[in-house]
Image (cartoon, grey):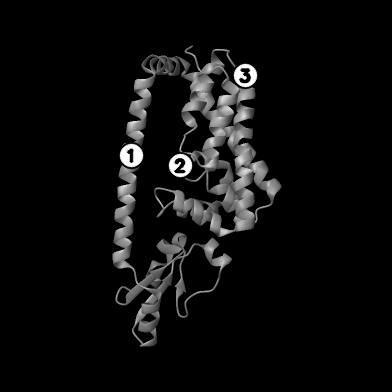
Amino acid sequence: MAPFSAHQYVFLFLWVAGEMLGLPIPSVPVLLATGAVARAGDLSFGVATALATLAALLPDTLWYLLGRYRGVRILNFLCKMSIEPSSCVTKTRLTYERRGALSILTARFIPGVGLLTPPLAGVVQTPYLKFLALDAIGTMVWAAAYMMVGAIFYREVDDVLRILHRVGFSFLVAAIFIAAAYLTYKLIERHRFIRKIRVLRLDPLELKERMDQGEELLVVDLRSQLDYEQNPVTIPGAIHISPAELEARHNEISRFAEIALYCT
């Protein structure tokens, strides 16, 4: 087995905790490598699973408390940090609205959802012990599953680790270059999206003036059910249709009137 780390357990704990705090460092490759190392007998599968679970639960508790006491603002903060702000929160909210607290069990397996689920659970006032139990079970299954895959395919993982150990610095430079290129692409995409929205944006004061003048406008409140329950105040005359209801209620939106959409 190729060298993994002189302090394997510490490395695993810090890496997983870092991702759960929001750092862009995916834990899946590390879990796969950990499983392969455990298969070789260099560390305990059970201890590694427990450490990975604990490493995730501590940051998750922090995010949960921030969501509970800071409300939707913490979700908006995380959304602003995302390179895909148009969808970073929507996917998580829809999943939580459809499945409730049980979505905590599978959140780790859905890209972009794992980080937002703990603060969202706090926002909707999910009891902490219930959240902690579901989060612990889901995280343990997540960590054990990927480590098991690494253990099953330990020869292939070992080959990859040996190659990485040989190429060393060259691979690191290539990985940084690829990551930087991807980030640049996503930032350009985000900038284009924001420019497009600005072109189509209707100022609230302009909307009010047009409504006061009696113009025929259909105003649709597209806030999620969670946002609506947090602040049920809406524009007079607007109809509320959450994104989860669009497919079922799209007939309520006239195809002949000018439509103004708004959300958080």
On the image, numbered disc 3 is attached to which residue? 44
Percent x, y of residue 123: 60, 56
Mark 2 neighbour class, 10 Å CA radius: few under 14, some 14 to 19, many 20 or more: few
Q: Do the residues bearing badges 3 and 1 touch, measured as CB atoms within 8 Å?
A: no
Percent x, y of residue 247: 40, 61
Circle 3: element type:
loop
Q: Earlier in the sequence, mark 3 or mark 1?
A: 3
The residue positioned 57% from the left and 35% from the top of the image is 17
On the image, numbered disc 2 is attached to which residue? 111
Cα separation between marks 3 and 1: 36 Å
- Image side of residue 240 versus residue 45, left or right: left
Circle 1: element type:
helix
Type of amino acid under label 1: Tyr
Q: Is residue 11 visible?
A: yes
Q: Earlier in the sequence, mark 1 or mark 2?
A: 2
Q: Mark 3 or mark 1: which is in front?
A: 1
Please count the marks in the image.
Answer: 3
Residue occupying the far bottom of the picture: 213
Cα separation between marks 1 and 2: 16 Å
Mark 1 neighbour class, 10 Å CA radius: few under 14, some 14 to 19, many 20 or more: few
On the image, numbered disc 1 is attached to which residue? 182
In the picture, residue 10 is in which quadrant? top right
